[in-house]
Amino acid sequence: MIKFLLLFSVLTVTLPVYAIDGDKILEQVDRNLNPESYESYKKLINIEPDGSKKEFVLFTIKKGKDRVAALFISPASEKGRSTLRLEDNMWLYIPNVGKPIRITSLQSVVGGMFNNADILRLDYRSEYDVETVQDNGTEYLLNLKAKTNTVAYDKLKMWVNKKNLLPSKIESMTETSMLIKTLHFKEMKDFGDGIIRPSVIETDSPLYKGYKSIMIFAKIKEKEFDDEAFTLTFMSNMESLR
Amino acid sequence: MPKFSYGNEEYSFDLSEIEKKPYSFGGHVEASPVLFWFDQNASLYKLKFFDRDDGGTAEEYNVTLQLDGSYEKGITKFYTKINANIRQSYLGWADQTNILEGYVSLNPSHSLSINMGKKALKWGKGYAWTPAAFLDKTKDPDDPDLALEGLANLSADYIKSYSGRLKTISFTPVLVPVYSDLNSDFGEKNMINFAAKLYLLLYDTDIDFIVLARGSRTTRYGFDFSGNLTPNFEIHGELAIIQNFAKKFIDNNGNLSNNIFNAKNFLLGIRYLTELDTTFVIEYYHNDTGFSENQMKNYFSFIDQAYESYSTTGNSTLLQQALTITEDNYGKMNPMRNYLYTRISQKEPLDILYLTPSITGIFNIDDKSFSLSPEIAYTGITNLELRLKVSILSGLRNSEYREKQNAYRSELRMRYYF
């Protein structure tokens, strides 16, 4: 009888945890953050310890699992620059230089804490596998591992609100679990067409003490684009998509 | 309007910031004081300063205004880029205004665009040199990001995307008319030249096949590629085959010879980013159309003889002859055969945001001369770019960099975008 009670208690405690499908949660997180194909406008703000700041406004388009492109709208020094990502290939087009040059996910076209992978982010599910899921009461804690070594951050810890299946915090780490940056998701906003998600992502990093980076979303809208909009030849013409 | 408070600051994202207007207007204004330290024993100093004495140093002040404007209506877009420069140097005041680009673009779909007017095509994959960019002005490897003037042309881009190993194909045919008042410096006049580029994104590698048919210039075939071996290691290359290239060169007595041959120019390069955010750009360039070490020595020797003759007789005929052969020939950027370009830049050292120190070396492999340019760039103030650059030119006598008119050069560039 004691053995049966012990087995019953073990099963009742562990079964719900095993029943959680981490991949499905991550897929839902992706869809709740944005449609699979969309256009959006976001502002990136780098804040230095003395309060001085630099702002960038970007128009971003995404199609399917592996195509994303972004156009700098301001400041004037960056206006007209565009970035393109096809799977793991990334390019930067600078109007003066003309031809697109290949860039890497770890480089940063804006400086500060945002790197190119943050600006041209694909779905988390496309780049990460869920290794473990912890049930922390009101939140799930997903431990994610990069599918390939081409992904900018090898490991992510993602805290997901159970109610709305949206992240509240993500820690990005190296293969040796060194913390690179923490993303805090804030300010829920209704963007229309059923897209309700945090409109602000605040980022800090132990590597940049005293510095902060903020990403504010103004518009997110489901939209389909031709595949040809995601090509090197089209990069100089991205403004026509707005 | 989304708003967000952080500390005592409130950040907002006003929708007016993303409103699209049919027209756009922008550009930059730039001031750049330059200081030159002359090498008064150098051949090119003797050639350019034979009839003047400006001392050992010279100052130069440049103010440049570059304007970009566009207007879009339906599928039609007008675009122009104008560059105006005022310079005060040892030669006095000079000003120049150029329409770098000015064209109309028709975009009936995302797959097709047709462009007519003056447009820089910017072909090739090299950073410092682009031997396969047959329709572009020659880049300055000392400042490869400078805007270049385009050729007047009629071109089209047809793009097709696929899923699978071959992700993109694009085809770009180009017509370049050359007349006495249109693209006159491109080559033989009264011709309409045809060129084309076929681009493939195949196996995650950018590949271009380029052809320039015989017309104002001889037939040229080009090939280039760029791909990532790892996410932080990019490799690129270019090959240009120039048929019946005519090279003019002189012996040390100034006798002109002509050699016609099929030239093969090529470039191989890498871009590598380390974990510490240091970027290495390294390129090897073989310029088959360039001069050998001996041909270059003969050229310098001829200038020295011409200068000697001027010094003793006051007759500058030989120096004028040397000036003529220098223009568009020996005076080209990197006129010799084998070069190595290396640029090492460190992003935000000591966690100082927006600061990028770098050092660039251009090495002439044939005569072992070089230019070395440390620089520091700061972009921390919105729309303002500051760059301080010093160049040191060195080598043995009768080598390319040693015989340039300057031994050192320093430049402060302040550029404000609006």
Image (cartoon, rainbow, N blue to C red):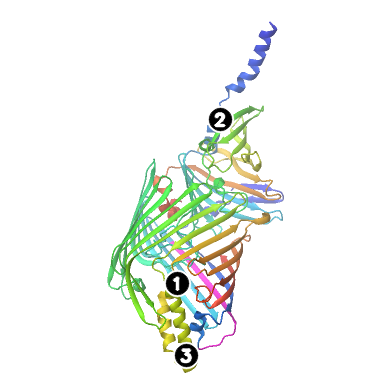
Up/down of A132 relative to A70, above or below: above
Callout 1: helix, strand or loop?
helix
Give the quarter of the image for residue B374: bottom right
Amino acid found under the numbered disc labelled 3: Tyr
* Distance of label 3 from label 2 (alpha carbons): 85 Å
Q: Where is residue A130 in the image (x, y as percent from the top left)?
A: 57, 31
| Start-end of magenta stretch | B51-70
Residue B386 seen anywhere in this rendered image of the structure:
no
Q: Position of residue B214 (x, y in %)?
A: 28, 65
- Whether residue B55 is in magenta: the answer is yes
3 vs 1, front mark: 1
Query: Of all residues shown, which one is farthest toward the bottom?
Result: B313
Amino acid found under the numbered disc labelled 2: Ile
Callout 3: helix, strand or loop?
helix
Amino acid found under the numbered disc labelled 1: Glu
* Distance of label 3 from label 1 (alpha carbons): 26 Å
Judging from the image, mark 3 belongs to the subunit labelled B
Q: Name the residue beneath numbered marker 2.
A: A25
* Main secondary structure along the magenta-highlighted residues: strand
Query: Of all residues shown, which one is farthest toward the front?
Result: B294
Q: Name the residue beneath numbered marker 3.
A: B310
Q: Which of A196 and A50 is in front in this view?
A: A50
- Image quadrant containing the C terminus of chain B: bottom right
Q: Is B102 left, or right, of A73 in this rendering?
A: left
- Whether residue A154 is in magenta: the answer is no
* Distance of label 1 from label 2 (alpha carbons): 67 Å
